[in-house]
Amino acid sequence: MRARNIKPGFFTNDQVLECEPLARLLFAGLWGMADRKGRLEDRPKKIRIQVLPCDNCDIDVLLHQLQQRGFIQRYEANGQPYIQVINFEKHQHPHHKEPESTIPAPDSEAMLAPSMTQQPRAGPGPISKPPVVNPSDFLIPDSLIPESSLNSDDTQAHKAKKEKRGRKLSDRISLPYDSLPPEWALWTHTEMGWSDQAIQDVWAYFRDYWRGRTDKGAQKSDWEATWHVWCRTQNIHSGGKYEQSKAVGGYHPRFTQPSKSERARAAIVESAIELGYAAPINARREGQS
């Protein structure tokens, strides 16, 4: 038996629900028995031992139910009976190290073979024709969720959310200022208590750092918020104090690159703004005024 995927839509598929409960369980068990191409030997006794060992049932009858509804194909190749799980490769992604299939694929002749159209071996009855429409074709690839079971409202809401997120990501821009905006300088002087010289020195380092980066992280949707985080980070590095600079004669925060944890905190703030959990500083300021 191999590990396979089973999705919630399996339990609400109207075609599956037409089968007996044990036939539904058997169908899922066949996925684990099948090789990476969805093929296995058509040996009812062996299948019962591996899938339904404690249930009093006729595996051949259950297999016939699955075949009638187009979920499996029973065929013969080289005189041996086999089973093909229909659309198996659409719905399952076997592990890349799983061995290749050694079972012959069903061909056009196999589709017309008696084993495809006959009643189960244990029960007599009239010969039925193979289904023209395969219900497996109505399953979404790699999900086994019927299209009819999807909630259109949820789908539209999900698409709208993705489009909204895409617009926010597209709003990211590189640092647009050569000189420090006056309102930023005012905030820094008021909140951080830095001198004008210290503020200009930090701005020069801030501007050169972000202009020198070429990766996607150098683009922000709210540069004012980035400046605030940067200033607070510098204050953390200096322990809330300033160091005397003999060369300039003013007070300057330590110019150090933000640590990994500090960059992570800044990224969280930016993500919260982009996802709508927090408003940009400009928007908050306008709301307060």
Image: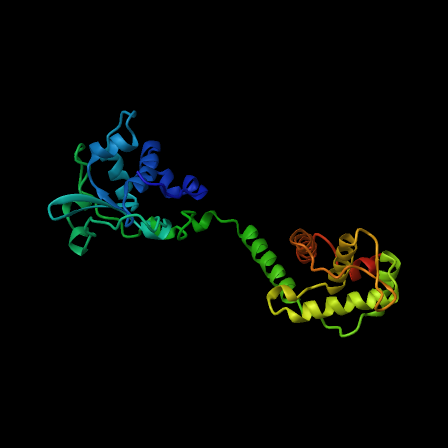
Name the quadrant of the C terminus.
Answer: bottom right
Residue 162 image offset from top left, x and y in percent: 58, 58
Which quarter of the figure has residue 67? top left
Tell me the residue at 67%/58% (across/down): 274
Nearest the eye: 7 or 255: 255
Protein image colouring = rainbow
Q: Is residue 131 left or right of residue 139?
A: left
Nearest the eye: 8 or 41: 41
21, above or below 285, in the image = above
Which quarter of the figure has residue 64? top left
Residue 23 image offset from top left, x and y in percent: 31, 35
Tell me the residue at 17%/51% (across/down): 110
Q: Is residue 131 left or right of residue 153?
A: left
Nearest the eye: 187 or 30: 187
Q: Point out the residue furthest to the left here.
A: 79
Numbered circles on residues, count: 0
Which quarter of the figure has residue 26? top left
Q: Point out the residue furthest to the front here.
A: 246
Q: Point out the residue furthest to the bottom here.
A: 178
Residue 85 image offset from top left, x and y in percent: 28, 46
Residue 36 image offset from top left, x and y in percent: 29, 48
